[in-house]
Every structure is written in C-alpha cells, then in structure tokens.
Image (tube, rainbow, N blue to C red):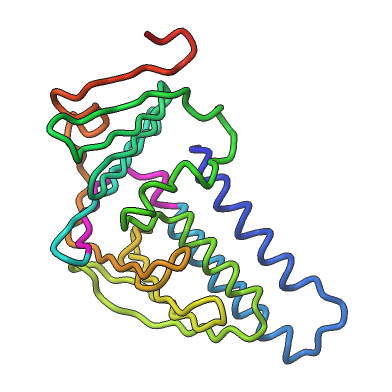
Amino acid sequence: MPAASTTLRMLAVSVIASLTVTGCQTFEDAGVAMGRSELVNDLAVRLDRALELTYSADYQLPGGQSAAIVQAQDPARSAYTYPGGRLTVTPEAVTRCTTTGARPQCTLVAPPTPGSKPTVTLFGEANQQGLVTPPVVIGLLSAAALDPQAVIKQSDTTVAGHHAACVEVQSSSGDFTACVTTEGVLGSFTGPVDGKPMELALSRYSTTVDKGAFDPPAGAGVVDRRPGGS
C-alpha cells in the first residue's frame, strides 16, 4: 500500500479519536463531533481509495490554466502537473521539473523511504501553483472538524459526469468547499490555502495512463542529486 494511503488513514483516525474521546462532552456535543468525524472519515476513505487506483485526472484552473494528477500501481507511482512544473514520485526518485523556460529543467532526489509518511513540503510547489492535492484537503477538513465554531454541510453534485459528495466548510480560518467523486478522486475545490484563494474542477477522468506519464518532459535537462547519482 502506498505510504500516502497509510498516512491519510492515520490522519482520519487521529481526528476521529480527538473528537470523540472528550469525557466532558454533552450528548449534543458528542452528536456534533460524531457528525464531523463521519465527514472527515468519508472524505479520507474516498481519497485513500484513489491512491490505490490507476487513473488520470485533468483539472481546470482559473484563467484557462490546467493541471493533472496521474496515479499507477505495481509499483505505486504518481505525477502532479501544474502551471510551470511537474512533480513525479516513483520508487526510484522524486522528480521536480520546472517548465517555464525554453527547456524544461528537472531535479531528481531520493524517493521517500518505503512505508514513511509523505512530508508537507513534497506537495508544496504543486499547491503554490494552484493544484490542491488530496492530503491538503484532508488537512483543511481535519482542522475544521476540530474547530467547535465551524459549520460543516454536506451535499451531492456531478463533476465531469461523475457523482461526487461535497463538503462545505465555514470556519474562522477560511471557508472552502471540496467535492470527492465516488471513485475517490478530488472532484473540485474552492477556498484559501495558506491564505491564497484557490479553485479547481475536474474536467476529465480516465482509468488509463499514458505510457510516458512518469518520465521527465521530452528534452528536459536533468540533474540527479540522489546518492550515487551523476
């Protein structure tokens, strides 16, 4: 099982535990906590499921820009393409590419240790450039679930022809809406991330992956910073 998948499950469990193991709760408070816990757990399970699938998802960003998430298994690989760059994670390396210049430039570093938790910084550049990743959505919902003043509502919709469950959150740290498809793919997101307004919506979903989805862009300059790399 991919490390990110294990992390999402652990995050959901920790949030549920923190919400339900308070000895001084009233029955009404416990009911509110349980409702929030169920929403967090449902979102975590759906996103976790996607980490174990092979799929390609294209996203529409504001201003006509686009992004994409590609996932494959055996071995587990993922690629996140966003305006100006791409992040690829495979058992061999973590590859970060910038595509703003005349020639793409990529840097290879050592891959995550098998079974380890992914770091927040791993997805930092993707988030900065408008591609909100599933772990970030889980983190935002978890924080809202722990906020006693937060208002969390659930609804259903259709995104790119796929049914999706949506969660609308109103809290002091910022309002956001996230939708996750039945398949477990992030369907849409609207709201601030680290103080920056962000918005994306699924435009295409496929259970197939292009052959070169995890390779550096054609013609890219590559710097290998892995131990023993050249």
User: Looking at the picture, does residue 102 appear above or below residue 61?
Assistant: above
Give percent across and percent down for residue 229: 41, 10
| Furthest residue toward right | 23
User: Looking at the picture, does residue 146 appear above or below residue 73?
Assistant: below
Give percent across and percent down for residue 161: 18, 68
Give percent across and percent down for residue 133: 40, 54
**Relative depth, front residue between 222 and 142:** 222
Residue plotted at (17% across, 58% down): 65
Magenta stretch?
Answer: 49-61
| Furthest residue toward front | 101
Q: Is residue 51 left or right of residue 17?
A: left
**Relative depth, front residue between 203 and 181:** 203
- Verify whether residue 167 appears in magenta: no
**Relative depth, front residue between 59 and 43:** 59
Residue plotted at (34% across, 67% down): 198
Residue plotted at (43% across, 52% down): 49
Q: Is residue 114 left or right of residue 201?
A: right
Give percent across and percent down for residue 21: 80, 71
User: Looking at the picture, does residue 145 appear above or below residue 133?
Assistant: below
Q: Is residue 19 left or right of residue 73?
A: right
- Label count reads 0
Quadrant for the C terminus in the image? top left
| Furthest residue toward bottom | 28
The image quarter in which residue 219 lies? top left
The image quarter in which residue 40 lies? bottom right
